[in-house]
Image (cartoon, rainbow, N blue to C red):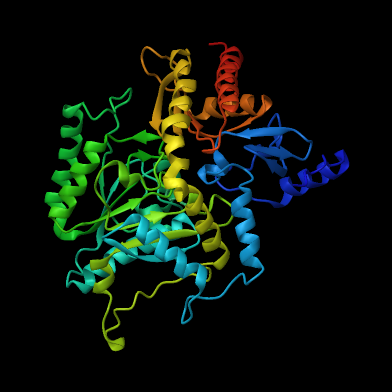
Amino acid sequence: MTQPNPLAPKEMERLRAIDRDTLWHPFTQMQGHQDEDPPPPIIVGAEGNSLIAADGRRYLDANSGYWCLALGCRPTRVEQAVVRQMSRFSQSTLLGLSHQPAIELAERLTALAGPPLSHAFFASSGSEAVEVALKMAYQYQVHCGHPERSKFLAFADSYHGDTTGCVAVGGIDIFHSTFGPLLFPVVRVDPPFGYHGPWEEADAEFVEKHANVVEDALRQHAGELAGLIIEPLVQGAGGIIPQPPEYLRRIVDAARAYDVKVIFDEVAVGMGRLGRLFAFEEIDRKPDILCLAKGLTAGVLPGSAVLASNDIYQAFKGAFSDLKTFFHGHTFTGSALGCAAALEVLDIFTEDEGAYLKRVREEVIPAFWKTLEPLRNHSLVGEVRGRGLMAGIELVKDKAKNEPFPYKDRTGHLTVLEARRRGVNTRTIADVLLCAPPLTVTSDELNTLGKVYRDSLDEVCRIIKL
Ligand SMILES: *Cc1c(COP(=O)(O)O)cnc(C)c1O
C-alpha cells in the first residue's frame, strides 16, 4: 500500500486557498471555517483507522467518515473487490437491462433479511433510499385504493437525509425549519427521549408512556397514513437518542394493526453499527420497507438499498397500461461498483458463521462502552448515551441542573478542535459530542479515544473557565 508523502508547505497553502475560496462544505458555516485553529485537515491518505493529512499528521477517525467507514479508513478487501469489478465494467443501467453484481446483491440482501423482505431496489445514498421508501409506501396505498393515505408518521429529532422528502419527514428544527414551505405535512410524535435515561427494557412505565403517544397518533390518523418512518433503536443525527427495544416492538405492532407500513431507516444503525447486520434483528420484528446505506459499501463508494416486502411489491404489478409501474430510478441505481463493494462487505460480515459481527458484539462493543464509562463523571458531561458503536456525549454547563450551553458558544465544537489537536477526528451535533469509530477499532485505539476525549474536555473546561 503506498502512503502519501506530506505535501510541501507551498502546495498545502495552494490547496488551502482553493478550499477557502471555492469549495462549499456540507453542513458547514463557511464564514470562519478556514480560520479554525487548528485548521481543518486536508486529507491525502489513510491507513488502518486513521486519516493522514497533507502535513503528515494522522487522525484516528472517531466518526468513521460520518458513520460509513465501518471497516476502517482503508477497507482493503472492499477496495480490491471494486477494482476487480472495474476490470469487468463499471456502469450499466438497470433500466431495461440487468447485471450480475446487482442480481447477486439483491439475492444476498433478501436472503439475509428474510421474508417478507423479498425484493431489493437500489439507489446511491441514504437520502435516496428514504425517498424511494416514502414514494413506494404511498404508491402502495394508492394501488390498494387509498390515495387519501398520503401522510407519514415521523418523529421529532429524527433525521432521514437532506433531499426534500427526507427533510419533510425529518424532525430537526435547526436543519429543517427553513424549508417548511417546501415540505409535505407529517404527523409528528415525540420520541422516547428521557434525558438521563432510562433506556432499558426493564422500565415498563417509560415504554408504556411513549408507546401510548404513538398508539394514540395511529388511532387518530391511521386513515391518512401511508407509513411510519423511524430510525430503529437509535435516532442518530438528532443527538444519538436510543429507544428501548420493547418500545419499538410496541409501535411496530400498533402500526401493523392499522395497515400503516413500517419503514425502518437503518442507514446509520444497520450494517454492523449495532453489532448486527440489521438492527431489526434485535427486536424480533421486521419492517415492511428497510433502508440501508452508509456501512453497506463500507464507505468505499456511494450505494444504498431499499428492501420491500412481497405484498408491497405485488401491489405494483399490473398491465402496462394500468400505470402501476414504480416510476423512480437514479442514474446510478444499482451501480455495478457499489454492488461489488456491498457484496464484499456482506461476505466479510457473514463468513465463518458471522464470526466478524460476533466479535464486534462480544468484544468491541463492551470495550467501547467501558472506555466511555469514566466520561460520565466529567464535570462537562451531562450524559453518555447510545448503543452499539454509536455514542453521544452530551455536554452541559451545569451538571446538577442539566443546564445546556448556549447554542452560540459552540462548546461541542471547541471540544472537537481540542480532539483534533490531539490526533482524533470527531464531530458534534450541537453539544452532543459523537463517538462512532469503525468496527475495526483496536483496544489501543479505544484507550487513545478515552484519553483524548477526557483531555479535550479538561482543556475546554480551562478555556471556558468552568
Ligand atoms: C446519514 C443518514 C441518512 C442520509 O444518508 P445520505 O447517504 O447522507 O444521504 C438517512 N438516514 C439516516 C438515519 C442517516 O443517518
Q: Is 16 above or below relative to 197?
A: below
Tell whether 234 sits left or right of 223: right
User: Is residue 272 visible to the viewer in this orientation of the structure?
Assistant: no
User: Is residue 115 visible to the viewer in this orientation of the structure?
Assistant: yes
Percent position of residue 304, x then y: 46, 58
Q: Which residue lies furthest to the bottom in this view?
A: 321
Residue at 74% over, 47% down: 1
Q: Is 228 above or below relative to 172?
A: below
Percent position of residue 64, x then y: 55, 40
Tell whether 373 sits left or right of 184: right
Q: In the depicted view, which residue is nearer to us: 239 or 106?
A: 106
Tell whether 90 sits left or right of 176: right
Tell whether 425 sits left or right of 160: right
Percent position of residue 388, x then y: 41, 34
Q: In which quarter of the image is residue 82?
A: bottom right
Residue at 46% over, 35% down: 359
Q: In the depicted view, which residue is nearer to us: 82 or 227?
A: 82
Percent position of residue 106, x then y: 41, 65
Residue at 53% over, 11% down: 466
Q: Quadrant of residue 127?
A: bottom left
Count of numbered marks: 0
